[in-house]
Image (spheres, rainbow, N blue to C red):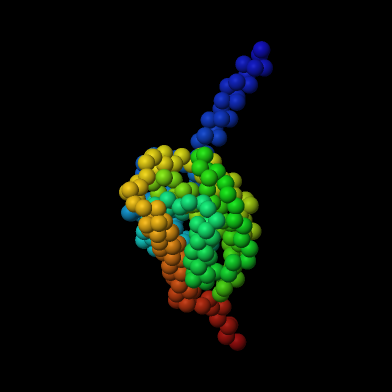
């Protein structure tokens, strides 16, 4: 009995310590999830100046991501200089069905946006998973940038709620992806769709073909805008590298 009485408070402290390692995101209509405590949240329309300053340290992200329509939140890992792992949440109007044709159209739109941003798709896995009880689409893409040859892994998860399509983009360097996948999985395991899954939204009264047309159009537009943002960030990096003055060695000593 004494062991039990000592283990109880100890276990409680461990649970409380674990709970303190996560932050809560609360979005529209009850949409929410938790993410690692050390990661930084950039929410529209205006980011905290200190967070914007932290973003400037990384070559693979830019404030231009906030200009992407339908973006709800951008979360990144500030732990290492040079490259920041990130989580992007977008909410697109309409609902996507997960039949074979719809999945094919979604993957085609995703691949089109990736190639237009200068990425080569090395390998891709398309599977179905469940998020908050909803059947969802998971697309895992191993990418290589055509110019820098930098390899990254993009995990795209589409959750078709009744009101809107909820889209998560998780990205990390390929050699670091396994290390950060638990953080990405935490988002999905704690995701609560909330009111996004109540009713049919403003598209509910339209005929199904018209709803499909609007939904797929918004998905394609959203992915194209994401590609535009990635391409713009790549150009900013190129301009920055051109403007950076070359390092000069020590001046030769006079004889």
Image quarter of the C terminus: bottom right
Given residues 137 and 177, the one toward you in this image is: 137
Given residues 196 and 14, the one toward you in this image is: 196
User: x, y percentage for residue 120?
Assistant: 58, 69
User: x, y percentage for residue 69?
Assistant: 36, 59
Tally the numbered discs. 0
Residue at 53% across / 45% down in the picture? 135
Residue furthest top in the image? 1
Given residues 111 and 120, the one toward you in this image is: 111
Residue at 40% across / 53% down in the picture? 208
Above or below: residue 12 compared with residue 212: above
Residue 251 visible at all: yes
User: x, y percentage for residue 215?
Assistant: 40, 56
Residue at 57% across / 73% down in the picture? 146
Residue at 44% across / 56% down in the picture? 54
Horizontally, is 179 left or right of 32 in the view?
right
Above or below: residue 4 compared with residue 251: above
Residue 76 visible at all: no
Horizontally, is 148 left or right of 70 in the view?
right
User: x, y percentage for residue 188?
Assistant: 52, 44
Image quarter of the N terminus: top right
């Amino acid at each position: 009995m004494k062991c039990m009485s000592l283990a109880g408070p100890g276990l409680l402290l461990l649970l409380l310590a674990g709970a303190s390692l996560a932050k809560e995101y609360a979005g529209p209509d009850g949409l929410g999830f938790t993410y690692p405590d050390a990661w930084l949240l950039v929410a529209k329309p205006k980011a905290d100046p200190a967070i914007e300053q932290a973003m400037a340290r990384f070559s693979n992200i830019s404030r231009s991501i906030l200009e992407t329509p339908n973006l709800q939140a951008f979360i990144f890992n500030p732990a290492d200089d040079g490259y920041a792992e990130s989580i992007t949440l977008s909410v697109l109007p309409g609902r996507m069905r997960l039949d074979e044709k719809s999945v094919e159209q979604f993957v085609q739109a995703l691949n089109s946006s990736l190639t237009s941003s200068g990425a080569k798709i090395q390998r891709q896995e398309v599977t179905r998973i469940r998020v908050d009880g909803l059947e969802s689409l998971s697309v895992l893409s191993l990418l290589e940038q055509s110019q820098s040859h930098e390899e990254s892994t993009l995990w795209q998860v589409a959750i078709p709620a009744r009101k809107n399509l909820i889209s998560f983009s998780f990205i990390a360097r390929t050699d670091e992806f396994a290390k950060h996948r638990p953080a990405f999985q935490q988002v999905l395991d704690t995701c609560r769709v909330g009111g996004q899954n109540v009713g049919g939204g403003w598209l509910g009264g339209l005929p199904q073909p018209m709803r499909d047309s609007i939904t797929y159009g918004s998905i394609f537009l959203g992915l194209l805008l994401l590609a535009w943002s990635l391409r713009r960030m790549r150009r900013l990096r190129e301009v920055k590298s051109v403007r950076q003055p070359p390092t000069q060695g020590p001046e030769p000593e006079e004889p």
